[in-house]
Image (tube, grey):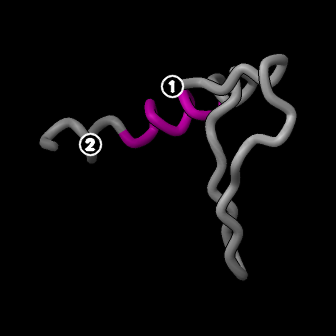
Amino acid sequence: MFALPFFRRDLPALKGDRVTLRVPLTNDYREWSVLRGESRAFLEPW
């Protein structure tokens, strides 16, 4: 599910020492799709 930032300003995020997990934003799609394409051969068996 993608976040709709115009509905909510305080989007939840989990922050650690070296990583931050947050809900995906629409602007994240292009970078995600490139990474998914590069990982396709590894991910297809799953």
Q: Relative to 10, is 2 above or below? A: above
Q: Residue 14's image quarter?
A: bottom right
Mark pair 1, 2: CA separation:
20 Å
Q: Secondary structure at mark 2?
A: helix
Closest to the camera, between mark 1 and mark 2, is 1
- Mark sitting on residue 1: 1
Q: Main secondary structure of the magenta part?
A: helix
Residue nearer the viewer, 14 or 41:
14
Mark 1–mark 2 contact, CB under 8 Å? no
Residue nearer the viewer, 17 or 40:
17
- Kindly identify the amino acid type of the residue bearing the numbered disc 1: Met
Q: Residue at x 78, y 19 (%)?
A: 7
Q: Mark 2 or mark 1, which is nearer the start of the sequence?
A: 1
Residue nearer the viewer, 9 or 18:
9
Q: Is residue 33 magenta?
A: yes
Q: Position of residue 16 (x, y in %)?
A: 68, 76
Q: Residue 13's image quarter?
A: bottom right
- Kindly identify the amino acid type of the residue bearing the numbered disc 2: Leu
- Left or right side of 9 for 26: left
Q: Position of residue 20 (x, y in %)?
A: 69, 62
Q: Relative to 18, is 15 above or below? A: above
Residue nearer the viewer, 7 or 31:
7
In the rendered image, which residue does mark 2 sit on? 43
Q: Secondary structure at mark 1?
A: loop
Q: Is residue 40 magenta?
A: no
Q: Which residues are magenta?
A: 31-39
